[in-house]
Amino acid sequence: MPAPVAVLSVATASPPHVLHQRDVAQAARMMFADRFPNFDRMAKVFLNAGIERRQSVRPIDWFFQPRGWTERTEAYLEGAVDLFAQAAERALDEAGLKGADVDIIVTASSTGIATPSLEARAMTRLGFRSDVARIPVFGLGCAGGCSGLALAARLAAATPGAVVLFVTVELCSLAFRLDELTKANIVATALFGDGAAACVLQAGGEGFAQVEAFAEHTWPDTLDIMGWRVDPIGLGVIFARAIPPFAEAHLRPAMETMLARDGRTLDDVDRFICHPGGAKVIEALESALSIGQGRLDQERDVLADHGNMSAPTVLFVLDRVRRAGLPTRSVLTALGPGFTASTVTLRAAA
């Protein structure tokens, strides 16, 4: 029987600039109120998002000027490499390892373009070996924390004894658009922050949890729910359909199907560890999975402290749940473009 894949560590990193929600709301009013007739009605999203503060790789003044691809990419490369290194170093330290011990690196990021990719740019800084295998992944969006962790677990299982480092970095703030007078852009302005998270995995290793299973479900004809639009200015957010009602209506049967592949049901899960896309998304998840309103407490706390950081956010929640005491069986889950639900089932170490 193959050795189970252990999650040796999980760590997070945040950029230095703290954006308080009240300040972001005031800045948005200055930028949009005179040009967007529905701004007053839309402004309620800043109060109802469940966010108190967020972190950004650039100070709030940076966003008052029009920015193009060149400036956005410069900010992405500088900020993403720093956050990659911080999260990776912390995860390796917790696992008692160094960069030279890493055999495989999986990097998930969908908010900027880096060629060479982030792990290549951080190789010298972290001391990675010249023969380390690098797997950069783009396009997973908010599901990247789960799907990337699942990919890392697959690679660890296929390469017994190999140390696999998974890092996800998202700088959602850099997609802010002064030129977009749309509901989707206002919602994104109220929700998104920047952050990074990392995990170390190893088949046969000693960690705080073992990976029992992983699964994905992509709904047909849902490409318009979430994603990026690419134009000469930068990335533009796509929210063509509301996510909370879709999740409330469709997540439960998909989750039941994913769990059933390994002979499990919803009743076998002690804790769902969810990507908190927003306050209404959290409520929809609680309803769809019959968790009970208010039970996703760590999700709400992460959202309040960091906003929606896309892929890393669910690992921020995992870190908090782990520190509070990981239950016997938990399911990490996130929704992302596709439109896709991704899961990783974890069993706490004895």
Image (spheres, rainbow, N blue to C red):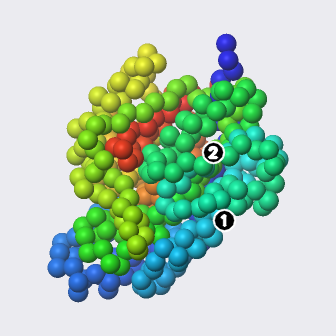
**Viewer-proximal residue among 126 and 286:** 126
Quadrant of the image occupied by residue 169 = bottom right
- Name the kind of residue labelled 1 in the image: Asp
Q: Mark 2 vs mark 1: which is more N-terminal?
A: 1
Residue carrying label 2: 135
> Where residue 283 appears, x then y in whole percent?
30, 47
> Where residue 17 appears, x then y in whole percent?
55, 74
45 relative to 155 in the view: left or right: left
Q: Is residue 348 visible?
A: no
Residue name at image x 35 percent, y 36 percent: 218
Residue name at image x 46 percent, y 55 percent: 310
Q: Secondary structure at mark 2?
A: strand
**Closer mark to the observer between disc 2 and disc 1:** 2
> Where residue 259 appears, x then y in whole percent?
41, 24
> Where residue 172 appears, x then y in whole percent?
46, 64
Q: Is residue 130 above or below residue 20?
A: above
**Can you say which quadrant of the picture contains the C terminus?**
top right
**Viewer-proximal residue among 241 and 198:** 241
Disc ID at residue 82 = 1
Residue name at image x 70 percent, y 33 percent: 202
- Name the kind of residue labelled 2 in the image: Ile
Residue name at image x 55 percent, y 35 percent: 150
Give how far apart the Cα atoms at labels 2 and 1 are: 19 Å
Quadrant of the image occupied by residue 57 = bottom right
Quadrant of the image occupied by residue 318 = top right
Q: Is residue 101 visible?
A: yes
**Can you say which quadrant of the picture contains the N terminus?**
top right
11 relative to 60 in the view: left or right: right
